Image: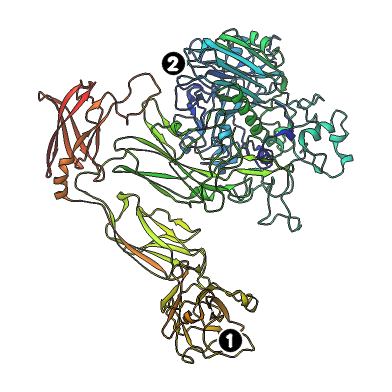
Amino acid sequence: MLTSKNNFGFLILVLAAFIFNSDLILCQRIIDKNKGDHNQTKKGFMDGNLAATVYYNFGEIGDWLNEPNRSGVWPKGTNHTYVDGVAIIVQAEALDPAGNTIHPLESNYYEFTRYNASTGVTYGWWPLPGYSGSSGSPARSDDPKTWPSIWPDRPADWNNTWNGFFGKGIFNADVETYFVFDDNEDREYILENNFTPDADDPSRGGLGMQVRARGFQWSQVLAEDVIFWYYEITNMGTYDYNKTLFAQYVDWGIGGHDNSSNNAGDYNELLDMSYAWSVVPFGSPGNWSPVGYAGYAFLESPGVPDDNIDNDSDGPTDEKRDNNPVNFITDPNLDPFLRNPFQDTTKFSDFYGYSWRPHWDADENANWRSYFDVNENGQWDEGELLNDDLGTDGIGPFDDNYEGPDLDGTEANGRPDQGEPNFGILDKDESDQLGLTGFKIYAVHTYELDNDEENWQVLSGLPAPHGQSLVGVNLANYFSSYLFSMNGRNTYSVITGQNEEAGETERFSMSMIFGINTDDIFRRKKTVQQIYNANYRFAKPPEKPILTAVPGDHKVTLYWDDRAEKSFDEFYQRINFEGYRVYRSTEPNFLENKIITDAYGKPVFRSPIAQFDLIDGVTGLHPIDVNGAKFFLGNDSGIKHSFIDTTVQNGQTYYYAIAAYDKGFETTTILGNIEGIPPSETTTILKKDINGNITTDINTAVITPRAPAAGYLAPEITSFEGSGPGTGKISISILNPDSIKNFNTYRIEFYDDAPYHNSAHPKYSIINVVENDTLLNMLKVNGIKEQTPIVDGFTADIVSDTVVTIDFAKSGWVNGSSNYIVQIGFDPRYQSAYLGKKIDYPADFEITFTDSGQGDLSFPADAFSQPILSNIIVNNITEDKNHFQFIFRDKNSDKKFNDSDAVFFVFGDSLGKPATNNLNRHVSWSVTLYKDTTIAEDEQRLPQVGDVFRVVNKKPFREGEFYEFTTKGQGFDKTKAEIDLKDIAVVPNPYVGVASWEPLSSEVGRGERRIFFIHLPNECTIRIYTMSGKLVNTIEHSSTISNGQESWDLVSKDGMDIAFGVYVFHVDAPGIGEKIGKFAIVK
């Protein structure tokens, strides 16, 4: 779809186009000459947001025939399906050696395709080897097990790194899949027409086309119902096709595979989107409702740079994505764009939002940005922004896998290179896109993919896209872009001195969209368009934290690392992390958490059970709403890396996720309108296979709380002591009992190098004293509330007073009963006198009153003053320094500290060092006495000899300060175990048909049944009998001492479901004892 760039709804998406990275890196791509092989087929499942579908690495999306319950699912985690299948089509016109015109159609689909009659193998797309790992799935960005160790199309430095669309090792989409396929196994036109697409390789079949395919998903709320599909199609042969078309076949199945004959569809011209719905309100199987809508939106098409037509309505007619820069144009009179009579400068400025500006000749839309030469020395220096000048690998210093400048010297060379953002292959607008030229809605089986000639007539003659509808049928769509040339590898390369290794490459992309109604999918399509306009770049959440879950007795303990807090946001050029949200569910897709709805009643945001955010003033609701719903940013609670959920039931299986989220983006336009994008969260993915097995991601967990074994002794902290003046608090939390070491002593030591030890961010280390092992070394206390990383099964919570301030609640008269007003802080009368000399000194002081002339000699107030022999003595009680220096501002010159007098504590140029002169003198807190004018003169009580006033302040942790504690590991007590035998029981008892902890199934059928034996010894045998004494089953329980639970699936030793009734169980724990009990299974 062609959309003016001045009409973007979200400013961030406009600007994001300047900073994307991509996989299509010409100088770093190796032409893969391997061929497709049907034995390389792998099946995947896209599930990175609420939209989910099965797909294959030969291009088929959805599969009603073999995967009816995983074909176009929405929302993920249900059996609500909407798509029977999708196929990618490439077709071209050619002449066989006899001069006959042929139109080979390349595709692959589960039905009605051309195939080898003897083998049953489809004549069409099959995957190339080497693009996935040993697992059964195509390569996915979020699962390194699916990656090959070596990518066939990348140099060696890409080994064991994600082969991303956005660059080497770059993860911009939350989930990205990548696979390559070709049409080599199409032997029909070789056998029947003696046609081969490659004169140099007669064994190559089909049209000689190779497809590099990708799928993208973002979990961000604006894009969570969408899957993007992107195709790069290359002519690998030598044959030049003058007439080529790309197409997509969509077979709808709205409402499930038993309901697809009740579908209806239409086309929206403005949005370039086909959409479909069900004419009946219930889906199958299971009569679920409501049945939503699904859409397929067209995005990108091949470019035609040589027809002197502005196909994409952006002004230029000659854009190319594979040309390289030669000249930098500074004079508009020398710009071939302006001198080409077929160009339209008005369209250019309307489309791009800017007029002509100096640019490299191959950067036709003038949007590539060189590095920012701050010091104007003609070269890039560390600290200067690289902008788009990243080099051919597409990554820069802020990317995690950056290892240094490109070896080919392209980084910061001041000119655009293939592989860099906003240039050539990486800039969709440097292609004169043909657009969607044809579209048709029809009943399934009107046209079949096994009839090439009929499909050529249909696909190359489809009417221009326009509104058209069809109701009450099994619905299908054809999308088509036609006709354009696809030349073979006949182009001479000046660089290599021979013909190119591959022919022309063109692109085609679509998106699958789901929603509750037409308004919903239309809103989603606008977001889709914005993502496409930004070169497939969208809001990226922080990195996923690594989660550990520990089951306990009626509790689950979660803890995670801090990697998300270090995530660099390329758009903001800063870390944009804001907080964590903890989600808990009894089903693996967290759908039950999605209860915050928008103005249309659609669930938009999930409700967490806990949330922790930075103390940074970013609080409350984010100003950018999603149809009326706003994201809650937090309340400055402080960051934690653990959470203990005490609201759980033993035996119930729970699914947990820790999601990191960012601050989002907002800006105010010149008209005063707020624009932006709401915060983004990390994905929370759990995969459940057909056998019910759960695979977790690094930030998700599945856990069942349970009671410990009989005789269990929990770990504990046996001693805790500290030494130091810091007024913060330290507490130790045991998070993983299995990791607590027995009788190990630990020390938390603090360090700072501030002259006065008043650093707001001291450093700390945690040391295992017994093993002389430094577990955490010199980490910085970042805020008021700090939780250390987990070590040896525990964490320390540090509550720090980061700023030295007076603690008024603890300051006051220690001895005496004077009713004078005491002002503590800094007497404003003397602000100018001590300008630049004030230090918030982190120590507590006592002022003791003496007889006149029996106190200490004061420090001179200024260069012209003399010391005063006072009636007070100042002691620094924190550092145990008596007779501490002070300045005495004796207002009435009576050498007594009384009405309107002030005392300032004095010190030298570092903590504990005395001042020797007015140059190295510094002052801190002052204490001023005033008569209380509300009290009668005869009732005024002056401080008396022996009275003591104490000044207390809040102090950060400092150098030399430490806390020490000892841990005692978990253990076993035989006597306690014998007593605990009485607690052995069965839950639930009685078992009535189904228990709450049994997982809900989206399939038809009863599903799993379970009961639990609890409070068992860690080693025992459980025997289950009927009331008549017949043995039903024997269960051997063997576990750690922290696990006293064993489940039983209500299946006998003979493999039969047990009958309803009362049963007897016998637990035998050698060396401990026995327990006999009963339980009932009730219908």
Residue at the bottom extreme?
Answer: 853
Front residue (pair 728, 183): 728
The C terminus: image quadrant: top left
Instruction: Determine the residue positioned at 61% across, 36% down.
Output: 30
> Badge 2: few (under 14), some or many (20 or more) residues near its Cα, within 10 Å?
few
Q: Is residue 114 visible?
A: no
Mark closer to the observer (2, 1): 1
Instruction: Determine the residue positioned at 67% across, 22% down.
Output: 272
The residue tagged 2 is 287
Q: Is residue 250 visible?
A: yes
The N terminus: image quadrant: top right
Three-letter residue code for mark 2: Asn
Q: Position of residue 1076 (x, y in %)?
A: 12, 34
Image-based side of 658 in relation to 478, left or right = left
Q: Position of residue 551 (x, y in %)?
A: 32, 43
Q: Vertically, is 646 above or below 821?
A: above
Q: Position of residue 1004 (x, y in %)?
A: 38, 18
The first of marks 2 and 1 along the sequence is: 2
Q: Vertically, is 380 above or below 130?
A: below
Q: Vertically, is 344 above or below 202?
A: below
**Helix or strand or loop: what does disc 1 sit on?**
loop
Q: Vertically, is 1037 above or below 614?
A: above
Front residue (pair 849, 72): 849
Three-letter residue code for mark 1: Asn
Report which quarter residue 324 is drawn in. Answer: top right
Residue at the right extreme?
Answer: 333
The residue tagged 1 is 892
